[in-house]
């Protein structure tokens, strides 16, 4: 069972991102403040849930959360500042939009760029330990998937509706065959070293 809070005396916002390892598309992050007494036995790390389960949990999270928000950093910004900084920036953008100010940020992972004057706690595999981080992981993942499914309609040859921009064999084969799109992250290794790409 996931924990409801890290410190019961503080207003906590769980934060997580989706899309860090992708070759195309933005990185998304979400921040969620849940009520202290919130319980949900189905809520878990988004990677452990089916697509159907994630989309069923999303409206439940949005309805029950005290406040939630999603932040986005596109592929152009990712190429400019690097993916790690972009992941933190997406989290900052999500926190910016919360209607209630958190007193502690629970961050999934082992690093974070401090946000204004709010303390943070980095938690490795936090999305499998705390409800608020799991909720953030589901929002970040589903909103990013929505974006990639939409992008797939314009660029069907890359199979983004299936791979969501991750480096699958089919995605890399399409890059080799058709080149890059305006959504590809050009600072990433898009093809294995033995294959060259004419940009």
Image (cartoon, grey):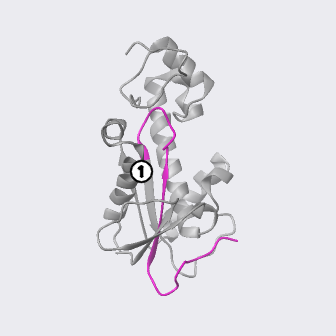
Where residue 101 sits: x, y (%)?
Answer: 34, 75
Q: Position of residue 190 (x, y in %)?
A: 48, 25
**Range covered by the magenta-colored residues:** 1-27
Nearer-the-camera pick, 119 or 152 = 119
Residue labelled with disc 1: 87
At a point 52% along the width and 82% down the height, the residue shown is: 7
Q: Residues within 10 Å of mark 1 (few under 14, many from 20)?
A: many
As drawn, is 50 to the left or to the right of 72?
right
Farthest-out residue, bottom? 9
Position in image of residue 57 (x %, y %) = 59, 59
Asked if residue 17 is among those painted magenta in the image, a careful observer would answer: yes
Of residues 9 and 81, the one drawn nearer to the viewer in this rendering: 81
Q: Residue furthest front?
A: 193
Q: In which quarter of the image is the C terminus?
A: top left
Overall secondary structure of the magenta stretch?
Answer: loop
The residue sitting at 32% across, 43% down in the picture is: 81
């Amino acid at each position: 069972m996931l924990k409801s809070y890290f410190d019961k005396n503080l207003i906590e916002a769980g934060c997580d991102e989706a899309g860090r390892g992708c070759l195309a598309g933005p990185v998304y992050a979400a921040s969620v403040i849940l009520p202290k007494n919130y319980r949900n036995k189905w809520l878990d790390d988004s990677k452990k849930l089916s697509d159907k389960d994630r989309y069923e949990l999303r409206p439940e999270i949005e309805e029950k959360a005290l406040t939630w928000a999603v932040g986005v950093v596109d592929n152009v910004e990712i190429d400019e500042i690097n993916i790690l900084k972009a992941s933190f920036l997406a989290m900052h953008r999500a926190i910016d939009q919360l209607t209630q100010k958190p007193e502690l940020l629970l961050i999934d992972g082992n690093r974070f760029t401090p946000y204004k004057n709010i303390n943070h706690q980095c938690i490795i595999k936090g999305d499998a330990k705390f409800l608020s981080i799991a909720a953030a992981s589901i929002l970040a993942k589903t909103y990013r998937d929505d974006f990639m499914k939409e992008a797939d309609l314009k660029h069907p040859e890359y199979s983004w509706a299936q791979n969501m921009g991750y480096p699958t064999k089919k995605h890399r084969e399409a890059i080799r065959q058709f080149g890059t799109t305006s959504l590809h992250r050009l600072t990433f290794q898009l093809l294995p070293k033995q294959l060259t790409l004419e940009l």
